[in-house]
Image (cartoon, grey):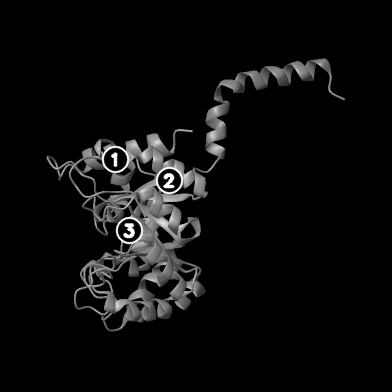
Amino acid sequence: MMTRRKFLTLAAFSGALLPFAPMLLARGQRQRYKIAVIDLMILKRQKLSALQLAKEIGADGLEVDMGGLGNRPTFDSKLADPEIRKQYLDKARGLNLEICSLAMTGFYAQSFAKRDGIEKTIGGCIETMKQMNIKTAFLPMGVQGDLVKNPELRPQIIERLKLIAPMAEKAGVVIGIETALGAAEEVKLLNDVGSKAIQIYFNFSNALEAGRDVSEELMILGKNRICQIHCTDKDGVWLENNTRIDMKKVKATLDKMGWKGWLVIERSRDAAKPQDVKGNFGANTAFMKSIFQNE
């Protein structure tokens, strides 16, 4: 039985903590939406110092690039070295940052449909994901894999996605592809691949450049087909000054869908100061947090 003295002591202690209750509650909850930047775009491709810069920018995490491809059989990745991987993981932990994904941007200029040895190339990324406990990878179809301009490549791309899907499934990871297709066509593409390990890494800019409504595209895809989002537009103005995207509407759409995850800032740099990394990405990160983490 609680005595009067114990009750008064407990009440006083609880009262002392009351002003801090919102902060304590927030710490105990995981953010529904997290904001990240990309090491390549903050001019720190495969550099450990990208993590410190991401922290200074105010991001919750970092997307780390796998390095260039060129004529090599696989990525020129420092992360193949166990010691380098440990340095990344230790540094991220020390800064309270997450490595949200790995990016295979080498495929922007390479043909996913035609390049030889695709199993080794993608397999190298998947192995790194396993070693670093990273669950998502970004795979752009790129210029040569543009299915709007080159629809004849669709069978080859589907065949290759079916080839790498079991590798991703076995590793328990997701490969997020970016295409030039509209959402309805992407749904058909994913259905033809037939694996939950292959999803869409959605990019606002692709929809905007094609004159499509971002929120409508998101709704068509649905929450289970979108692994991550590049919350970006082409360079010119910061996201907060971009008149062709209503970010509050986008958040309302994602809320309605029940989606949660990483929003990764890629571009949307001020045209007058394209090299101002902290200025551009700091402003965009702060704006995205004001919209998506203001509750």
Q: Which mark is residue 34?
A: 2
| Element type where label 1 sits in the image | helix
The residue drawn where x is 40% and y is 63% is 184
For residue 184, side relative to residue 146 (left or right): right
Q: Secondary structure at mark 2?
A: strand
Residue denoted by label 1: 284
**Identity, as a three-letter code, of the amino acid under mark 3:** Val
- Under mark 1, the amino acid is Asn
Quarter of the image containing the N terminus? top right
Q: Is residue 12 visible?
A: yes
| Residue at the image position 24 percent from the left and 53 percent from the top | 209
Please state if 220 lies on the left or on the right of 288 as rendered: right
**Mark 3 surroundings within 10 Å by alpha-carbon count, few (fewer than 14), some (14 through 19), many (20 or more):** many
Marks 2 and 3, how far apart at CA? 16 Å
Label 1 to label 2: alpha-carbon separation:
13 Å
Q: Give the residue type that dot 2 points to.
A: Lys
The secondary structure type at the circle numbered 3 is strand
Whether residue 61 can be seen here: no
Q: State which tag comes first along the sequence, 2 or 3.
A: 2
Residue in the picture at 28% in, 70% down: 147
Above or below 176: residue 256: above
Q: Is residue 285 above or below residue 85?
A: above
Q: Quadrant of residue 164?
A: bottom left
Q: Nearer the viewer, residue 93 or 124?
A: 124
Residue 173 on image: x %, y %: 47, 67
Disc 3: which residue: 64
